[in-house]
Image (tube, rainbow, N blue to C red):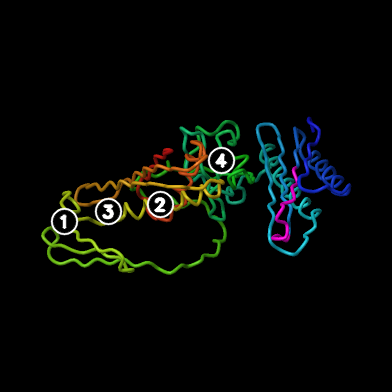
Amino acid sequence: MEVPLETSFRGFEPEDAVKDLVREKAGELDKLHDNLIRCRVAVEKVQSAQAFGNPFRVRIDVTVPRHELVVKREPSRGRLHDPLHAVIRDAFDSMGRQLKEMEEIQRGNVKAHPGQSANAVVESILRDHGYGFLRDLEGRDVYFHRNSVLRGGFDALREGDAVRYVREEGEKGLQASTVEVVERPSSPAPRPGEQEQEPPARGKEPPRKVLSPRTGRARWRGRYQDGEGVLSGGSGRFEAAYSFPSRFREAAGTGPEELLGAAHAGCFSQALALGLEKAGHDPGEIDTQAVVHLERAEDRYAVTRIDLDTTVRAAGLDEKTLQEEAARARLECPLSRLMKGAEITVTARLG
């Protein structure tokens, strides 16, 4: 280790056995990686300890060339007085697994067969901002930065690439510390409207929780261009008239695409609010407009693009966090996932 071990203890006076354990486990990490630069360990006892089985917060930061690895263990409910020794060991064991995985990738000790080595697929890439998201075997979105892609391969990365990555817990949740491409689709990523290729097998699907279904209803009377109808929700909270002119010629009334825009804006706004909360911000007010593009090709109409434009008013929120969480919300919103055949863009600004 190039820099001596750094430790800090807050909210309590640690026993010598705790200090010895931290030094011992840090020494084991040093043996796992030939070029470990720094290891910082912070242990804090949360003041409201009576509310938790484990009242301790443990954070380990490890620096190796080109990468920062982080493991966090938060106070959690459980058995009273969960031993601090166990929490520390668990955190160091997790860091050890991250270092081993990264060593395997950097040394090339991975099997060449994609089905055995790939553990995620590239879901989206925001090249202008220098980051993107993976979709792992458990269906989770994993953030990665351009510097995490091995051998400077960020610019050549494509959506749909099968990759192997090393996972870490960052400040804002799950992220990749190292990303390596192990397989590329035989053809380029699909354009809007084209059928997407199936990603590599992801193993067993995680269990699903089925929520109560929501109902929408439409009553239509008359011919295609001369008739008229009413759109309503199963809750009975809204009802709106629509017709051919209101849908395709901007006449008075509404249409399915307008309601789709409102639904997508609402879905995205809630997903963004959740992301901001997880990032430690009070969402305040989120104002989102969804512009739904309905186009006609030959004799068919299709929704080809949805532009989401959102303004967020939240105390202390910075531009970088806003852009990251807006990009994540675009992926996490259930309606975005439903409409994969359409291009979905996001413009986010601070209000």
Q: Residues within 10 Å of mark 1 (few under 14, many from 20)?
A: some
Q: Residues within 10 Å of mark 4 (few under 14, many from 20)?
A: many
Residue 145, quarter of picture: top right
- The type of residue carrying mark 2 is Ser
Q: Which residue is label 1 attached to?
A: 244
Q: CA distance from mark 2 to mark 3?
A: 14 Å
Range shown magenta: 42-53
Q: Which mark is residue 336?
A: 2
- The type of residue carrying mark 4 is Phe
Viewer-nearest residue: 223 or 62? 62
Q: What kind of element bears circle 3? A: helix
Q: What kind of element bears circle 1? A: helix
Q: Which residue does the image show at 29% across and 56% down from the upper left?
A: 259
Q: Which residue is label 4 attached to?
A: 144
Q: Which residue does the image show at 35% across and 55% down from the upper left?
A: 263
Q: Which residue is label 3 attached to?
A: 257
Quarter occupied by the C terminus: top left
